[in-house]
């Protein structure tokens, strides 16, 4: 089946054009972009009149968590250390059933696709263990919806109290006794599990669905686990996806536990390289940034989540100047509340203006569009497959109406996309050559039925989760004190606007 988009305005995001729009046709055949140019031959293709329409690459969500999808709109005014108590309870209840795993993944996929995200990186976290059948439910949801996805099964094998500074000192003994997580997962067991996933789930849906290796964070995993994960990711050509220096607490953690920053720790372990993708990277120092640039690693920048959890503002200009690859992520729907990368684009562009008066360092629309498309694809090691409109690449694209309110009056398409558009102008979404959204309707799965089933199941889920929240509230004073102590520890720089806990000016 061929599809010809006739007389379009094209925003290719390739090396030749960048974010500069141009006119032309685009031909899709067998899931790939066969040709781009003027007056292309139809050859029996379905012809879509793209006059006054914009064709652009599908957006890439470089970091999210499907496990949070049902916690949308539940929390606010919580720093990460407190929020984790409720979104990822220390005192865990029963696992949600497999159908709910499928439904929460399907909901994330539907919202993503309808808002222009054609690729997502789901840092799937499903404690207490790792179960291929449960992971397969997420893969099945993404396969049915038609989205492209990298999916992990995040691992941690260090006790929570040994992954947080001051925790064993602050937490009362009576509360410590409640935290019996059982024996940690040994590295060889996780490697065996990942091997099984690579042999069964990785590459499903004609290669559209892939597995990625995800040690949760350097302070939450043993050194041998980190090194084994990195080697496994290299062997399979996938990213090692991890969380690093999201908060001030984590900036204190490295020196407290390892005598160096967490980035330096990763570097010294030999696991900081081109296949390493770091979520957040807020509290990185100049020395950290230099190491990251030399390694050629990637960062998934979660501008909205960082703000909601009070983590601070990531030094994106410095990271770019050092040569770090940057993508944009929503993070989970509990710390962001939407799956819309258009929202993240706008915030990512604007928040950098608050880092200082040097306006030449603020981000421009073209840079943000790069992060949302080809840059995001690079963080997922998929830049040879998607992220730009180029001959031979997968036909992952959006068609937007340039006559919509968000483009009126039309001035600069790139600036409209970053500062004005929210996804409402999208008329068509294509992934791997298949139209998955047309006229705001999913073409692959029955959206109404999925939503109806979720509504039916949510009262029981919410009641169970509320019980977990009440049980875990006993740990909040400990987490609040950890956050307070870390906040007022002077590390020589700050990522807070008011400069709390620093001696010098905020670094950008």
Image (cartoon, rainbow, N blue to C red):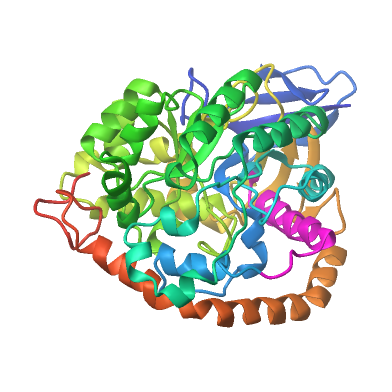
Look at the magenta stretch and give its main secondary structure. helix
- Give the vertical position of 471 relative to 272 (above or below): below
Q: Percent from the top left, x then y, of residue 452?
A: 84, 71
In the figure, residue 155 lies in which quadrant? Answer: top right
Q: Residue furthest left?
A: 503
In the figure, residue 377 lies in which quadrant? Answer: top right
Left/right placement of residue 238 relative to residue 428 reads left
Residue in front for this viewpoint, 470 or 404: 470
Span shown in magenta: 93-117
Q: Percent from the top left, x then y, of residue 35?
A: 70, 17
- Give the vertical position of 235 relative to 453 (above or below): above
Please identify the quadrant where the N terminus is shown. top right
Residue 113 falls within the magenta-colored stretch: yes
- Give the vertical position of 429 relative to 98 (above or below): above
> Residue 248: in sight, yes or no?
yes
| Identity of the residue drawn at 65% across and 41% down | 152
> Residue 11: in sight, yes or no?
no
| Identity of the residue drawn at 57% across and 32% down | 380
Residue 30 falls within the magenta-colored stretch: no
| Identity of the residue drawn at 80% across and 56% down | 102
Residue in front for this viewpoint, 138 or 216: 216
- Give the vertical position of 143 relative to 31 (above or below): below
Q: Percent from the top left, x then y, of residue 147?
A: 74, 42
Left/right placement of residue 161 relative to residue 126 reads left
Residue in front for this viewpoint, 508 or 487: 487
In the figure, residue 213 lies in which quadrant? Answer: top right
Please identify the quadrant where the C terminus is shown. top left
């Amino acid at each position: 089946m061929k599809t010809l988009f006739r007389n379009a305005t094209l925003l290719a995001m390739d090396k030749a054009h960048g974010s500069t729009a141009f006119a032309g046709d685009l031909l899709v055949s067998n899931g790939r972009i066969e040709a781009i140019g003027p007056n292309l031959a139809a050859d029996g293709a379905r012809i879509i009149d793209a006059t006054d329409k914009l064709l652009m690459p599908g957006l890439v969500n470089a970091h999210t968590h499907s496990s949070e999808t049902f916690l949308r709109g539940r929390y606010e005014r919580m720093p990460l250390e407190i929020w984790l108590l409720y979104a990822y309870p220390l005192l865990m209840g029963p696992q949600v059933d497999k159908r709910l795993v499928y439904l929460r993944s399907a909901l994330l996929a539907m919202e993503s696709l309808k808002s222009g995200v054609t690729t997502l990186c789901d840092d799937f976290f499903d404690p207490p263990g790792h179960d291929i059948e449960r992971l397969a439910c997420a893969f099945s949801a993404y396969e049915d919806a038609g989205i492209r996805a990298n999916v992990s099964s995040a691992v941690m094998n260090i006790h929570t109290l040994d992954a947080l500074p001051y925790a064993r000192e602050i937490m009362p003994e009576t509360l410590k006794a409640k935290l019996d997580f059982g024996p940690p997962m040994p590295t060889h067991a996780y490697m065996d599990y990942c091997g099984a996933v690579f042999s069964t789930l990785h590459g499903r849906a004609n290669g559209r669905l892939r597995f990625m290796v995800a040690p949760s964070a350097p302070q939450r995993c043993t050194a041998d686990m980190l090194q084994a994960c990195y080697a496994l990711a290299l062997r399979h050509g996938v990213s090692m996806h991890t969380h690093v220096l999201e908060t001030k607490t984590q900036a204190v953690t490295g020196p407290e536990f390892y005598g160096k920053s967490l980035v330096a720790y990763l570097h010294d372990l030999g696991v900081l390289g081109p296949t390493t993708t770091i979520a957040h990277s807020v509290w990185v120092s100049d020395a950290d940034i230099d190491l990251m640039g030399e390694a050629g690693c990637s960062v998934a920048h979660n501008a909205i989540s960082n703000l909601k959890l009070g983590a601070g503002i990531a030094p994106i200009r410095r990271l770019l100047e050092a040569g770090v690859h940057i993508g944009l992520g929503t993070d989970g729907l509990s710390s962001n509340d939407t799956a819309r990368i258009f929202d993240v684009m706008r915030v990512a562009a604007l928040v950098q203006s608050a880092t200082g008066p040097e306006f030449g360092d603020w981000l421009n629309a073209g840079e943000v569009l790069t992060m949302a498309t080809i840059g995001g694809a690079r963080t997922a090691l998929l830049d040879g497959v998607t992220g730009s409109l180029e001959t031979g690449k997968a036909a992952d694209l959006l068609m937007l109406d340039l006559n919509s309110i968000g483009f009126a009056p039309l001035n600069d398409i790139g600036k409209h996309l970053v500062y004005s558009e929210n996804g409402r102008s999208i008329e068509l979404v294509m992934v791997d050559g298949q139209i998955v959204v047309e006229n705001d309707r999913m073409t692959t799965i029955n959206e109404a039925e999925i939503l109806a089933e979720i509504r039916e199941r949510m009262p029981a889920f919410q009641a169970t989760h509320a019980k977990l929240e009440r049980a875990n509230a006993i740990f909040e004073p400990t987490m609040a004190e950890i956050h307070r102590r870390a906040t007022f520890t002077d590390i020589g720089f700050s990522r807070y606007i008011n400069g709390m806990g620093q001696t010098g000016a905020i670094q950008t």
